[in-house]
Amino acid sequence: MGYVSTVADPDVYRRRSIKQNGDHYYEFVLTYVDDILCVSEKPNATMEILSKVYSLREQAEEPERYLGANVMKTQLSDGRITWSLSSDDYIRGAIDIVKGMLAKDHRYLKTRGNERPMPENYRPEEDTTNELTPELATRYQQLIGMLRWACELERVDILLETSLLSSHLCLPREGHLEAVYKIFAYLDNHKKSNMIFDPKVIELNDDVFPKTDWSDSVYGDVSEELPPNMPEPLGKSVHMTCFVDANHAGDTKTRRSQTGFLIYLNNAPIDWYSKKQNTVESSTFGSEFVAMRITMERIQALRYKLRMFGIPIVGPTSVLGDNESVVNSVSKMEARLNKKHNAICFHAVREACAAGWIRVGKEPTETNVADLFTKMLPTAKRREHLRKIFIKKVRQVFLKKNAPGAGIDDSS
């Protein structure tokens, strides 16, 4: 059929095509086990050929589900129609499973008063309750797996809590299991969510990014290393923005820090991360630099993947953090490092800035949404950040087939 498997992801197939208006673009076929998603102006041409070889349950219809998630169209408050993703059905099924488990134990899911997934003062690493029996430990691991998939499907509101509890898969305790039940109780109170993939380009304030001439730096004449076998970029270009944060010495037992970041393409959140760092850093500066390096490596991999898909990327990735010392150290050529053990992170991030494929700027702590993924915030602050990610204050229109604009729900 003329599709080629992309090197960056062998399950994504690409084919050059021309739209009716004469624009060149790439058609895509994404495969995952027995799920196939075709992205094209004319998907029928591809799906009809596939239907002669495979028995397709649905053919050439706009997707409503993909990998357990609900896929839908949403009308924003300015009238634009965009795609969105929801894990509502998956969450309902998961809650039913948990309620069934508790019913066998003659218990029920305590949903009253659960306005957050985990109490603000709960520390899983300090939990000294009894170890779980092998049967309940297996249950704990199963439930953590369900929560982690929910995070993949857009439930970033439980990402930090799931990450913290995932650290105890080898030796879970009764308190850890109760904490998992509490997350499901929170989900039962907040079943509905909808992550909007808004293609609108967000204009950033360039003044927060220090201007630096790297031509005389120790890194020499460096530039972004482009894949030699990447296809010609076609179609609409994307801008990449990332918010990053670290919680210094957040783990009270090991004093390891938590890294968190959120990456946007235009105004669409597409990648999120919350994980404990592998090293113990003696200062906030060190933990923030480790977080910056981890983020930089993820951005580098994502830029490579997008280029191998044939998607044009505009300019450097804008990385926003709330530690001014790190921003200055990364962005100013005259900055010097006084702590040798931070040298690898320091120079790796600075060289990326010198090469011009990232730029680092200051984002106030009050508005840094990556805070959600590193520390237990007060409930009001959690809601404020989540409203930015899920874009609650829009009029959502769930479009039915052949009925554009039907089903307006202003209460959303």
Image: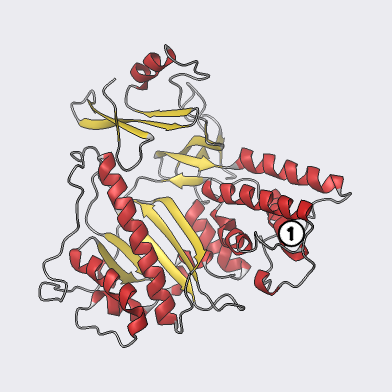
Q: Position of residue 127 (x, y in %)?
A: 72, 71
Question: 10 Å neighbourhood of mark 1: few (<14), some, or many (≥20)?
Answer: many
Residue 100 visible here: yes
Residue at 22% x, 78% y is 332
Whether residue 385 sits left or right of residue 219 in the image: it is right
- The residue drawn where x is 50% and y is 35% is 72
Q: Position of residue 340 (x, y in %)?
A: 33, 84
Residue 362 is situated, as x and y percent measured from the top left of the image, at 34, 73
Q: Camera-side residue: 95 or 341? A: 341
Front residue of this view, candidates 263 and 236: 263
Badge 1 marks a residue whose secondary structure is helix
Q: Is residue 111 visible?
A: no
Image quadrant assignment for residue 283:
bottom left
Seen from the viewer's position, the closer of residues 265 and 66 is 66
Image mark count:
1
Which residue: 39% across, 35% down? Answer: 11
The extreme bottom residue here reads 338
Quadrant (top left/top right/bottom left/bottom right) for the C terminus: top right
Residue occupied by mark 1: 177
**Residue pictured at 77% horizontal, 64% vertical:** 131
Name the foreground residue: 354 vs 197: 354
Tell me where residue 86 sits by quadrant.
top right
Residue 64 shown left or right of residue 311 in the figure:
right
Percent of width and height locating residue 162: 61, 58
Quadrant placement of the N terminus: top left
Q: How is the image coloured?
A: secondary structure
Reply above or below: 342 against 20. below
Relative height, residue 374 to residue 315 (above, below): below
The amino acid marked with disc number 1 is: Leu
Image height check: is 392 above or below 359? Answer: above
